[in-house]
Image (spheres, rainbow, N blue to C red):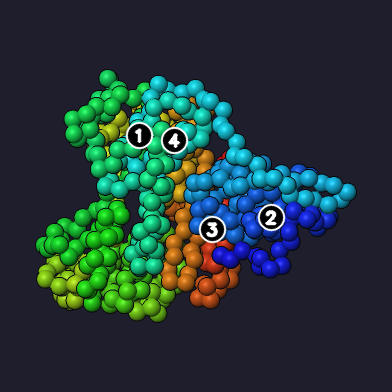
Amino acid sequence: MPEPDDKTAPDLSLGIPSADLVEGKPLFGKVAGDSVLLVRENARVYAVGASCTHYGGALAQGVVAKGQICCPLHHARFALATGEVTRSPALSPLACWNVEQVEGRLYLRAQRPAPRPARADGPASVVVVGGGAAGHAAAETLRQEGYAGPITLVSADQSEPYDRPNLSKDYLAGTAPDEWIPLRPADYYKQLEITLLVDTPVAKLHVPSRLVELSDGRSLPFAALLLATGAQPINLDVPGADRPSVFSLRTWADSKRIQQAARVARNAVVVGASFIGLEVAAALRAREIEVTVVTPEARPMERLFGPAVADFLRRQHEQHGVTFRLGSRPMAIGHRTVTLSNGEDLPADLVVLGIGVRPATDLADKAGIAVDQGILVNHQLETSVPGIFAAGDVARFPDAVSGERMRIEHWVVAQRQGALAAQNMLGRKKRLAIVPFFWSQHYDVALRYVGHASRWDEVRVDGIVDRLDARIEYLSAGKCLAVATINRDRESLDAELALERQLAAGP
């Protein structure tokens, strides 16, 4: 998403007429080589960095709402007054400048230093189990909220926290280098005084004694605990599923192994038409590998998007050379072959499974924490044991409107839950009331989805899906539950804000 043209951008240090700044409409400019946005909201004028700190989205094309600037790319938000991140997936704040008004002109002066958080009281110590989106967000949020006590982030993963959504997209396709994947530099956690333990599985939770027992025999005491153990890929139960040519994609190491196999592969079979499955198919096609997607569904992802978008996604992949075997299942995996339920043998130098995940609940279950298709939490993400929280893919929470329990497996949702759990560890007593958001990339198609619609009775389409320009609304009894957009990023943001207003109004 490109920024406005630098060549025509005004030098804001020289000033602009105050009348040129329209309420709620960001104005792009430059100051000493930096790209800056001027924003007027409710008679106040702010100046912040012009690029989102997540993937560099152009904030000039975003939305101003309630003292925030919202990025149209992946829906990160920043406080206009301080530049602080108010909504994931961004991790770092925006720079801010002082604005002066002199004789009807607005001038940008010195860049302001980042604000320091006020010290916050909290538990004597915090342990976070899981180094994914929720766990990482919780550890950072504790420091950003002013918590000064000990934080230990324990991860079974071999790597420091990284950008998992990229693993099935650009990174697997070979267009994103290794240095893009870590969320933070290696010395960042020491600077924040967060003890990071990687490649360190947790063996057991001792709830009465408030101890986390590690696989190496060490024990970590905690006053507050976050379980962000995520989910585990579902394995295929057929002969040959344990062959070295069969892969799941969950970790950075998994993506590297698939890349290695792809260097010498000519044919690949992707089992499952999930987001992971279809994104893997697109990434392997970018490597000029022949790809067949096998799924028992009649349409890929119809349960999530309905028939129109499902058929569109299929056509999109077929136009890029992907072959589908719909209504089929693998029955056996042989040496460079996959045998289907109809008896067909597909050539397969490598096989990637994208058939879903299961929440990693074993630790909680064995510790006596309530579990039912996920770790059960309340509106504040606290489990059945006081002082122990759960967030991310593993957490099964009550919907803010219906009260129906649900589990959502999306990166941004996990980040936002991790941040909320951290705030509630500090006694903030905040309720989980967020509108879910996720994005997916299929070749040149940017697909955004806000809300949650497990069931609907009406689908409204504005635009033409096949022309890569559409808004799709999912409704139940006339009420909009979710909105998908194709190449309408600004409308996706507007839909998210509308759903938030609807959520705040209640049922």
Disc number lying in front (2 or 4): 2
Decide which of tag 3 and tag 4 comes sooner along the chain. Answer: 3
Q: Amino acid at mark 3?
A: Gly
Quick check: 43 left or right of 328? Answer: right
Classed neighbour count for the residue bearing mark 4: other residues with Cα under 10 Å, few (<14), some (14–19), many (≥20): some
Tell me if I can see residue 157 in this picture. yes
Q: Residue at x 22, y 67 (%)?
A: 261
Quarter placement of the N terminus: bottom right
At a point 35% along the width and 67% down the height, the residue shown is 174
Pointer 3 and pointer 4: residues touching (CB < 8 Å)? no
Residue 405 visible in this rendered orientation of the protein = no
Determine which residue is flagged by label 1: 195
Determine which residue is flagged by label 2.
31
**In the image, residue 442 above or below residue 215:** below
Q: Which residue is mark 4?
A: 192
Nearer-N-terminus badge (3/1): 3
Viewed as shown, does residue 322 lie left or right of 402?
Answer: left
**x, y percentage for residue 306?**
44, 64
Disc 2 or 1, which lies upstream in sequence?
2
**Which secondary structure, mark 4?**
loop
Under mark 2, the amino acid is Val
Q: Quadrant of residue 168?
A: bottom left
Label 1 sits on what residue type?
Answer: Thr
List x then y, in percent, for residue 129. 32, 36
Disc 3 target residue: 56
The answer to which of marks 2 and 4 sits earlier in the sequence is 2
Q: Could you tell me which secondary element the residue under label 2 belongs to?
A: strand
Residue located 23% across and 39% down the image: 201
Of 143 and 505, nearer the camera is 143
Q: Are marks 1 and 4 in contact (CB under 8 Å)?
A: no
Marks 3 and 1 sit apart, C-alpha to C-alpha, by 29 Å
